[in-house]
Image (spheres, helix red, strand yellow):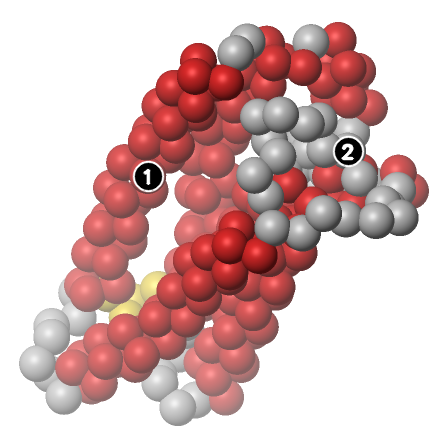
Amino acid sequence: MNEPFYRLDIARVQALRKQTLTVVLFAGLAVCLLGQARWRPGSTVHELIEWLGLLLIVICIIGRTWCTLYIGGRKGTELVTLGPYSISRNPLYLFSSLGAAGIGAQFGSIVLAVAAALVSIAVFSLVIRQEEQVLSGIHGRPYDDYRQRVPFLVPRFSLWKDADVLEVRPPRIVMTFIDASLMLLAVPISELIEYLQEGAILPVFFLLP
């Protein structure tokens, strides 16, 4: 598959991902605006869930940046099978799902955190299937062998292999870091929603465990 067709296919897949995630994001925001965590803001359980969520977001930011060191700008021209891609075919999406769970946890709800992770995994799985068809067309048998050997999402650490030297592309890394860091906006947004709910400015229609 030549480069123009590759770019067209990947652009279509990425557009689908963004559209789907936008719908999911607004649906999730609606849930947060209408509901509240069962554990009140300021309580020990509520704060622990929020801190755990913040940790997951930080792991997501670091993890996505780490993955980009290996694959940034190479997906259409090289078959990347080292570093995080030696133990999982889609580590970027795995870290993104952890970040989604972290965003859900900022509202102090375990259910919302788990739901955010599961929905993101479901959305990413659809996108990944389409991406894999494109990559199979580009790389052929080597990619099919790689797909048979390396897990879809959950890493198998016994397969770890690393590169002796990496060609780093700073613009890609910086862009990924900035994009991932936007997840941190969930912290002030969730605090604002909680403040408005505690002040009875926003009504609460249901409680989430």
Q: Which mark is residue 18?
A: 1
Q: Say if mark 1 contacts mark 2, CB within 8 Å.
A: no
Q: Is residue 189 above or below residue 69?
A: below
Q: Is residue 133 left or right of residue 39?
A: right
Look at the image and tell me in which quarter the C terminus lies: bottom left
Residue 173 higher or lower than 74, as above or below: below
Q: Is residue 107 visible?
A: no
Which quarter of the figure has residue 105? bottom left
| Depth order, front residue of 143/7 | 7
Pointer 2: what residue? 81
Q: Nearer the viewer, residue 204 or 155?
A: 155
Whole-percent x, y for residue 41 in the image: 35, 85
* Above-or-below relation of 68 to 38: above
Secondary structure of the residue carrying tag 1 is helix
Which residue corresponds to the image point at 47% horizontal and 84% vertical from the top-left?
47
Residue at 57% x, 57% y is: 170
User: Mark 1 to mark 2: distance in Å?
Assistant: 26 Å
Position of residue 27 relative to residue 58, above or below, is above
Is 124 situated left or right of 145 in this image? left
- Which numbered disc, 1 or 2, marks the residue closer to the eye? 2
Question: Mark 2: few, some, or many residues within 10 Å (few <14, many ≥20)?
Answer: many
